[in-house]
Image (cartoon, helix red, strand yellow):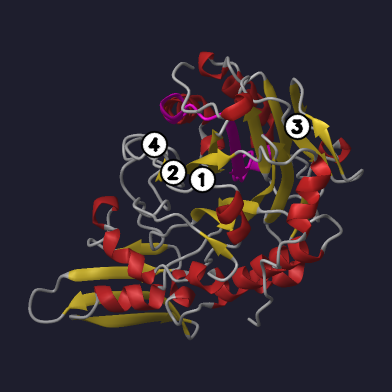
Amino acid sequence: MEGSNNKSGENGHQDSCGVLLVTANLGSLFEDLDNMMPIWLKAFYKVLQRLQPRFVAIHCQEVGGKNFETGMNLVNNFIETLFGSEEMRCYRRSHVVMDKNYQATDDFTALGNIYFIHDSIASPKYYDFKSKEFRECEGHVRYLDNLSQSTSHEKMKFPKNLFPESKFSRKGFLRTRWCINGSIFDLINLHLFHDASNVIAMQSFPSTYSNKRKKALLAVLDRLENDQHDKVPYFVFGDFNFRLDTHDVVKALTTSASGEYIKEDNDVVKVIFTENGNSGKVVLTLEKKKFEASEISPNKAKWLLQFDKEAGSFSEHFLEHEKSFAPSYPYSEDMNQGENYMQTRVPSWCDRVFYSKSANESLIMTNDNQAEYEVIGADVCMGDHKPVYLHFSLANSKDFENQDIVWRKFNNLSPIFKETAV
């Protein structure tokens, strides 16, 4: 990987290193791994080669796919293929933790964290949550079928009372901590609940699903703030399942239309909005898992940003880079329709990268012209979710002479989070 974007500072220090954070819901990938994996990896490698990051983190959700009982057998193949390419030749240190044990139903999250470090990074370290010490990252360490033996992560499946209708699914978080170039930070993989029904979601905002997501995320933030480990800046990236204000989206699409509400057993199961007048044109058809609207497509999605409200509930807790990409979900799973949305849900920015205010102040270089917040594979089929990445330059903590000074710096930070009522 020629042409590093790193610059050397005084006394041989690297002033910065490129960091690439990727969130990728892989549910669709494992449904057709033979055909989709080459396309997925090609799009990923294209970004890797162009940006040439020094530290890469991929946070995966729905590892093994929707049919995880059979799809889990394909996970190791995906990891081996990912690391076996020519593009990875300069990343000879890696750390992988995968939650594959679907038989542990009370604990299973289907989350997976993949990290790889460029040869130019000196002495990268990961945190041991048991001993509360940092350990040197050497060679390729993979916890694929033996996650319980790893002490380099913290995992939590959300308690059943937080799930909509109290129905268990693969949702939770998977956390690691790193020391790169003297900078210490947490990386949290998160998967929150989806909207089970468009009909229910359109009734009000925030919807019942949005409220459940908020409670779950606040539980994660509270745990980060009050657990036994030192408080450090963090990045949380994953499938938040944040949805648009469906009520107002429907209202905007149907300003000149009338709705026909079809019921079964006294419950609305379908709504058909027809343009007023004599045209008879149907402008929107909405069912539990159907959202057919001709006015929504990836190249006509910028206007939807005004309805992206869920993340606003956490504006006091974390930040996000400006979005210029179309909603990352739900894209077609048809290999020939990768640029189009499925007509199943309101297109939304489900896949996000957020960072704490302390990370913004101490880790992300100011005036970073190379910062990018984008999707991977916009023009090809990547599954129903487009992977989303944030690339930035990590400021080098060259003034820290030892780890004790680093700890003192972070322990003196004021609390990042304030608990709010839901």
Image-quadrant location for residue 73: top right
Identify residue for label 2: 368
Number of the label disc, if any, that sits on residue 220: none
Give the Cα separation between the discs numbered 3 and 1: 34 Å
Q: In this rendering, which labeled residue sits more in front, label 3 or label 2?
A: 2
Q: Residues within 10 Å of mark 3 (few under 14, many from 20)?
A: some
Q: Answer yes or no: do the residues labelled 1 and 2 have beta carbons within 8 Å?
A: yes
Which residue is under mark 4? 377
Q: Which mark, residue 144?
A: 3
Q: Picture coordinates of residue 308 (x, y %)?
A: 41, 67
85 is within the stretch colored magenta:
no
Q: Count residues near mark 4 (Cα–Cα under 10 Å), then give few for <14, some for 14-19, many for 20+.
A: many
Mark nearer the N terminus (3 vs 2): 3
Kind of residue at disc 4:
Gly
Determine crowd level at label 1: few under 14, some 14-19, many 20+ residues with C-alpha closer than 10 A. Answer: many
Amino acid type at circle 2 is Asp
Q: Is residue 387 left or right of residue 398?
A: left
Which of pointers 3 and 1 lies earlier in the amino acid sequence? 3
